[in-house]
Image (cartoon, rainbow, N blue to C red):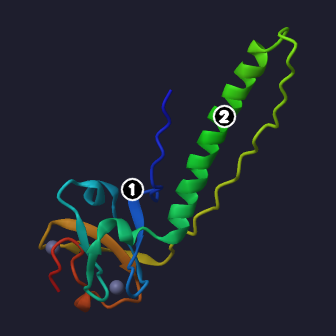
Amino acid sequence: MKEKISIPTDSEGYYSLECPFCKERFKALGGDIDAEDTLDLFCPTCGLVDDSVNFTPKDVIEHTEALAMNYMNRELNKMFKKTSRNMKGSGISFKYKKLKEEKPKLLTEDENMEQVELHCCDKTIKIHADQSRETIYCPYCGVN
Ligand SMILES: [Zn+2]
Ligand SMILES: [Zn+2]
């Protein structure tokens, strides 16, 4: 069985994103970010462009890494268990220490975010409510 490790989204399916330049947080719909033609993103705040993977916040990366690590440990535990069972009666004793699972860090929910409709690309993003809507750039096409 394959376990899919995916980047967590909020209850409405938005990814948390963080600009690698100005560190401003915003959110965009998972399906839009995963779309094949979305390679680069513009920061809604400073308008700089970078590879969309660089917009993944550090805490989200750590969260997914912990999930991946737990999955690996679980698989290793299964493997060790099987090996030690197979060795029963062979005269060789095999002991293993069960690998512990790490609790993934809880992700901080960005509160106080407002939805903004981007008419240029017909998409919706979320930005901090205190940010001026007049000066945001579209993450997909860079239109101000
Ligand atoms: Zn920025
Ligand atoms: Zn646009």
- Residue at image location 64% in from the left, 61% down from the top: 105
Instruction: Return the mark for residue 76.
Output: 2
Q: How crowded is the residue under tag 1: few (<14 C-alpha within 10 Å), some, or many (20+)?
A: few
Q: Quadrant of residue 96?
A: top right
The quarter of the picture where the C terminus appears is: bottom left
The first of marks 2 and 1 along the sequence is 1
The kind of residue on which mark 2 rests is Leu
Q: What is the C-alpha distance between the residues marked 2 and 1?
A: 32 Å
Instruction: Identify the residue shown where x is 38% and y is 79%.
Output: 19
**Label 1 amino acid?**
Gly
Specify whether 101 is left or right of 11: right
Question: What's the mark number on residue 64?
Answer: none
Disc 2: CA contacts within 10 A as few (<14), some (14-19) or many (>=20): some
User: To which quarter of the image does residue 41 belong?
Assistant: bottom left
Residue where numbered disc 1 is placed: 13
Query: Considering only vertical position in the picture, is 18 above or below 107?
Result: below
Side of 70 where 12 appears, left or right: left
For the residue pair 129 and 53, the one nearer the viewer reads as 53
Residue 111 percent coordinates (x, y): 51, 75
Relative image position of residue 56 (x, y in whole percent):
42, 67
Q: Position of residue 66 (x, y in %)?
A: 61, 54
